[in-house]
Amino acid sequence: MVLNEILVLVISFVVLLALRVPIAFCIGLATMFTMAMSIKTGPAFTTIAQRMSTGLDSFALLAIPFFVLSGQFMNRGGIARRLIDFAKTVVGMLPGGLAFVNILGCMLFGAISGSAVAAAAAIGGFMTPLMRKEGYDNEFSAAVNITSSTTGLLIPPSNILIVYSLASGGTSIAALFIAGYIPGILVGLSLMVVAAAIAIRRKYSVVAFPGVLEAVKRFLDALPSLLLVIIVIGGIVAGYFTATEASAIAVLYTFILSVVVYREVKWKEIPSVLLESTVTTSIVLLLVGTSMAMSWILAYENIPQGVSAALVALSENKIIILLIINLILLAVGTFVDMTPAVLIFTPIFLPVATSLGVDPILFGIIMVLNLCIGLCTPPVGTILFVGCGIANTTIPKVIKPLIPMFIAMTIALLIITFVPELTMFLPKLFGY
């Protein structure tokens, strides 16, 4: 009977997804169909509403709308342009300088906004025309922007790490934030190596050093934006406030910076900023609610225990099992959006990982990086669509230059998976 319910869950979800039903409704309807299989002896349909409600009843989730709102202020407040100018000063003179600027700009903007989509749109919107003007291949520029924008999901503050904390049963958000730095930087450096190799082979131009005085000016212009990272993460690590309280502080800081200091967000634009933030938050929280309902039905049917037993039966070798988990997550990331994937698959794979001695903090970073790669791949690659739209190109054209970027990200994933000290160094240093 359990096998029948698993088949109903999987088949209904895949069919609905293939019919292009919005992902939140795919999850909710697949959960309803599964519950219908055992409605006489099992839970009632009202359980879905109850689980959605209780799943959203979390203080940690309150950080998501605040970080979304602060990201909107950052996106409109001239932050991207100042970070790009600063990045030009730091890495513009290296081989393939503008590609390096794109990568570093996405890392910095993603770290501030916590949004890969915002980073791809804001940094790509500035850098793609500039790179095209300097003779860079349009598809190469798009590939660089698409892959580098995902680094902001690893480098804190990151909304998806907050979601993982909820799904994992309360893993420290502060520890996850701290743990994301080295993996995020490693991914960025891996992409830079590939970009440099391609730029040298194609003899792309570099950016001239602007001079010491101009470099200092650009740094001072970008400094207020960069201080947000220190204020938010520093305050969390020092224990002055929680991640949720830090998100509210981030809103206040970005509001002052964008509206009062830079004056690039007008007072009359604030209602539209709030509306966009509300829409984005609603989408995310609907996904969270329906995913929590599906996670519950998975637990009710003892599916996580079954998957754990099956993986252990396949092999007792830790390396083999972790490779299998990575492969499954890479495949999942190509079809399922990141938020529901984290909420659904964390309860399934986390017990397996912890039984192998993998720290929940490390597994969270591994899972997020896997799904970051999925964001850049068809058919459900959100960042892929955004990046192609900004570069005015098509997915088939951008796939070829994306392949070496995927290889670099996969190598970084394997290093993070099998060299746990890289990820756990900072959390242990700060006592987590």
Image (tube, rainbow, N blue to C red):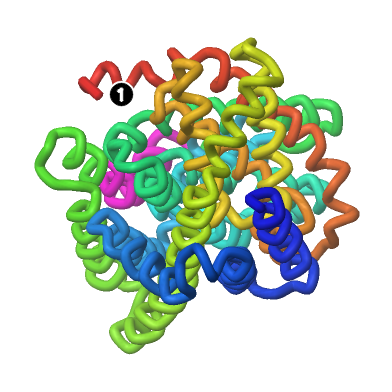
- In the foreground, 241 or 9: 9
| Residue 54 x, y percent position in the rendering | 32, 64
* Residue farthest front in this picture: 41
- In the foreground, 189 or 92: 189
Quarter where residue 68 is shown: bottom left
| Residue 355 x, y percent position in the rendering | 47, 20
Q: Is residue 223 magenta?
A: yes
Q: Is residue 280 above or below residue 106?
A: below
> What residue do we see at 49% from left, 53% from top?
295
Secondary structure mostly taken by the magenta-highlighted segment of the chain:
helix
| Residue 200 x, y percent position in the rendering | 79, 26
Q: Is residue 338 magenta?
A: no
> What residue do we see at 27% from left, 59% from top?
58
Q: What residue does disc 1 label?
A: 427
* Residue farthest bottom in this picture: 268
Can residue 137 be seen by looking at this rendering? Answer: yes
Name the residue type under label 1.
Answer: Pro
> Circle 1 — which element?
helix
Q: Is residue 427 above or below residue 295?
A: above
Q: Is residue 88 above or below residue 197?
A: below
Residue 240 is left or right of residue 162, and the answer is left
Quarter where residue 47 is shown: bottom left
Residue 215 is left or right of residue 396, and the answer is left
Can residue 77 be seen by looking at this rendering? Answer: no
How many labels were placed on the picture? 1
> What residue do we see at 39% from left, 65% from top?
51
Q: Which residues are magenta?
A: 211-229
- In the foreground, 127 or 60: 60
| Residue 6 x, y percent position in the rendering | 67, 53
Graded by Cα atoms within 10 Å as few (under 14), some (14 to 19) or many (20 or more), the crowding at tag 1 reads some
Residue 361 is left or right of residue 36, and the answer is left
